[in-house]
Amino acid sequence: MKVKVLLLFLLGFAGQPNRVIAQETRATNVPTKASVRNPVDSGPAVYGRFDGRFPCAEIAKDWKVTVGPECTKVKWSLTLFQDPKTGQPTTYKLRGTLDRSAAREGKWALVHGTKTDPEAVVYQLDSDKPEVSVYLLKGDDHVLFVLDQERNFRVGDSYLSYTLNRIVN
Amino acid sequence: MKTRLHLKLLKKSILIVLAAGFMQATSPEPAVYFATTPCDGIPRMWLSIPATADCEMIQWNLALQRDPRNQAPTFYKLSYAYGISKPSTQTLMNDGTRGVKEGQWSLVKDRKNRDLYRLTPTAPDAPISLVKLDDRLLHLLDQEGNLMIGHAGWSYTLNRK
């Protein structure tokens, strides 16, 4: 009997040599949860965290950084901080920038308008350094779009888009 | 004699310009948008992906056809592939599982005055809505009209090819 059970067990594995356990999927449209290794900063001073991946070359050009052809994509994990009393933007921390050894930090501000929509809500990173500012269009509370320096949309490719998504604990 | 020659040349030029314009207006080339998205419950439902299927990413290729006479939306063809990503590549393990959905598409305005692309597949599949961000970008919406939320790896924005 024990031998039979063992054989069935082994056959079960042999029949699915390439089986990979599926990732956890979200049944509804809600922000994904942060990993235990990289939790979201919490507290009233945190406006939110937004993560995403997109092609490397354009952002390197904006930041006036020289990168090689091996830089095909960047992974961003952006935390926006706010004044706990007023809710006004204060600073940001960006991990996973072109220079992975250090987080990029600076000020951010709320500005309005793109070329096609004067009412659009836009977050400006490095608002005190317009020559290297990054503009993020607020799609809604959970989704941001990375704009170019003229505040136009950027077009991704078949694999990556210039979109950041809210992450929660 | 010279005037006749000029007239002939003028007629020929007009015909060439008209023919070029006609060919452009009747071009059968669809607008194609592509993306790689997560494989969450909502896209699984749209694309009839079994709940038990091993799926972490979906590759989308959406071709939107218009009537060449008046540019009105007509048919769409959504080709997709899903499965587990192959490490260090942009492809799927064993090429994934492929499928195709087809139907009619239309342009509508929603209550927020946004331009929506509505894909209506043949029954019993559920319709799919996308919001137009600009001429080159569409973003998938959930059933309540909210932007679909991606994760750290992939998003729900479709890019013009």
Image: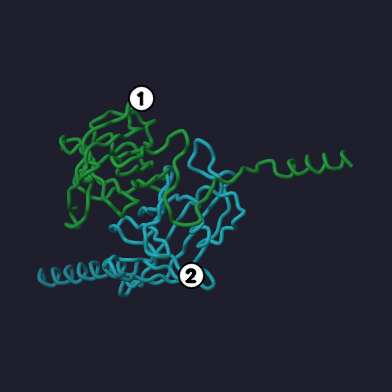
Chain colours: A green, B cyan
Callouts 2 and 1 on one subunit: no
Q: Residue furthest top?
A: A101
* Residue drawn at point x = 34 percent, y = 70 percent: B107
Chain of the residue where label 1 is placed in the rendered structure:
A
Query: Which residue has dot 1 on it?
Result: A101
The quadrant where residue A135 appears: top left
Q: Nearer the viewer, residue A22 or B137?
A: A22
Chain ID of residue with mark 2: B
User: What is the x, y in percent for residue B96?
Assistant: 57, 49
Dividing the picture into quadrants, the one containing residue B124 is bottom right
Neighbor class of circle 2 (other Cα within 10 Å; few <14, some 14-19, many 20+) is many
Secondary structure beneath disc 2?
Answer: strand
Residue B28 or B101: which is nearer the viewer? B101
| Residue drawn at point x = 32 percent, y = 39 percent | A79
Q: Nearer the viewer, residue A84 or A3?
A: A84
The amino acid marked with disc number 2 is Pro
Which residue is denoted by mark 2 in the rendering?
B121
Residue kind at label 1, given as amino acid type: Ser
